[in-house]
Image (cartoon, rainbow, N blue to C red):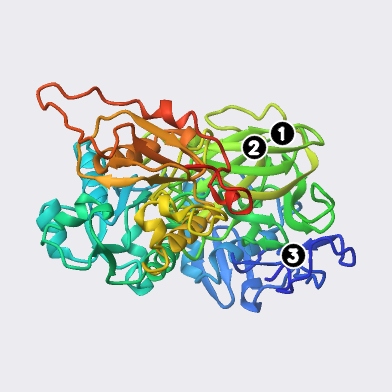
Amino acid sequence: MQCCSCSSTKLSSPSYPSILNVQGSSSAVGRKFSKNCLHPQLLSSSPLPKPFLQLSYISNTFLYQNSSFNLPSRTYRGTISAESWDLGRFLKTLYFFNGPPSPAKFVEFIIDKLSSPSPQESAKKMENSGIVLVAGATGGVGRRVVDILRNKGLPVRVLVRNEEKARRMLGPDVDLIIGDITRESTLKPEYFKGVRKVINAVSVIVGPKEGDTPERAKYSQGIKFFEPEIKGDSPEKVEYLGMKNLINAVKGSVALRQGKLLFGFEDDSFKELPWGALDDVVMGGVSESKFQIDCTGGENGGPTGLFKGVVSTANNGGFTSIRTRNFSEPEDLSAYDGLELRLKGDGRRYKLIVRTSPDWDTVGYTVGFDTVGDQWQSIHLPFTSLRPIFRARTVSDAPPFDPSNIVSLQLMFSKFEYDGKLNPTFVEGAFQLPVSYIRAYIKEPIAPRFVHVSSAGVTRPERPGLDLSKQPPAVRLNKELGFILTFKLKGEDLIRESGIPYTIVRPCALTEEPAGADLIFYQGDNITGKVSREEIARICIAAFESPFACDKTFEVKSTVPFSEPFTVDPENPPPGKDYNVYFKTLKDGITGKESLEQSPVPV
């Protein structure tokens, strides 16, 4: 069933009805919420196919149309009162979650319910997550990044264009995918399964006009020492369009700063889920709930979801809940740390149940949460707090929760906690819980998930009043090199706008010198100098662990002048750096672009 039309009308429009019944929404797609609200019938009042109504209970026999199915003789726990129990609502619940069942499957379901078997859920081997993707892994910085990550024992996957070159350079056992960021069709979604962090060291190829050695010896000396030209794809194709393709490819695997919306209202759009009531009617009770859209009950007078009902302990019942149908495709939330619910509390304690199996009656990973009466609040439920529960009992040998395979969600108000405990806030009667949204979140403090190696000087070609004769070659030759720095800056902007937590590192002229020299981190794009490729590789990896590096853009150079070579005694190498000391000096919002509209700052 559809809960709203696909019109683009804003949420604030006052002309639509205040309550929409949306129990049993048929899809989980995002759409615009509009005043042309539809009124799908409630599950509890919608007619079932005629044959479904031809079922009655006589002694130990269920009759279905003209056929009968004898249940095996056994002593059942408890009885069902025909005067209060709603058989029709029971059947409609089964119909909503399971579709039109066959008579045999229905009988199997009843027998299974009455005999209370233990859940049979085999432990699945979780796929390796936390993979670091290195794009541009055969370049000067990229191959050093790969070496450091592997020496640390971290899982690495490389994105390369030339498999033979990559295996020769990185080893035959390297986990690699063959793709080209300039060709979107080569970046297949399955390539990025399990990727949680990205280091992008891809760059347009610049080389000497007169040619270079197979090892690119002239290039390695730096652009300062040869007359450059673009080799291969243009800067626009690599630095801008390639960046756009790469971000789109990894966006579903690495987490977004604002989280991932599963249900609810965001700006003027609505992401729906197929909710249906699942109450104690399935065990003979009389409690009843439903799910609606309240078009004016939200935090700021806008729409919100509404879980409401009446709970009763009659017939040994005592719970109401709403549960989604199984998602058409499992949600992979393994890049996130938990689920956030934005809701208006009523002082009661509720449960969230997350299922990773498509089976109907199976383990639910469960956590209880308390609400504050008549107050909008954000409830953060870490995945680590989820407990494997089956029929109110902890399942000690259940497989660990797998956030990469979430198939359904359930909200419950119940008399029961688990393992014999009772809900201390439970009272019989009416209740309602407005839920504005459910989203996956990243826990604070947030560290970068996407580290990009850019270049110092990207804002300088268009900077007013700048003396280009005193600038590095790439700045002076920006136009001749296909606007290389202009498109590098455009690529940076794509990262900043992507919603992925990021770090953008802008090295000055790169050298083959060893790491270890003293460094200068700067912001505003005003410095020149040199820095080791090895040092940049280390900085990129360190950024992943530092919240101080998150969403920062900075330039870096060594304190050693160009005219002086930097060497290291292998027998007495310099101590490793604590890059967090440098990251702590960085400020938000400084990119150097602010200088494009101001007077130039002297270099």
Which residue lies at the image location 60% right of the left edge and 66% below the top edge?
29
In whole angstroms, how far apart are the C-alphas of marks 3 and 1? 27 Å
Nearest the eye: 265 or 268: 268
Q: Position of residue 184 (x, y in %)?
A: 38, 72
Nearest the eye: 406 or 108: 406
Of all residues shown, which one is farthest toward the right? 15
Q: Position of residue 214 (x, y in %)?
A: 10, 62
Which residue lies at the image location 20% right of the left edge and 44% below the top edge?
512
For disc 3, the marked residue is 42
Does residue 471 show up?
Answer: yes
Dot 2 amino acid type:
Ile
In-image side of 378 versus 211 (left or right): right
**Eyeballing the image, is 393 above or below 507?**
above
Q: Position of residue 229 (x, y in %)?
A: 28, 67
Secondary structure of the residue carrying tag 3 is loop
**Eyeballing the image, is 555 above or below 426?**
below
Dot 3 amino acid type:
Leu
For disc 1, the marked residue is 371
Does residue 391 show up?
Answer: no
In-image side of 242 versus 135 (left or right): right
Dot 1 amino acid type:
Thr
Along the polypeptide, which appears first: circle 1 or circle 2? Answer: 1
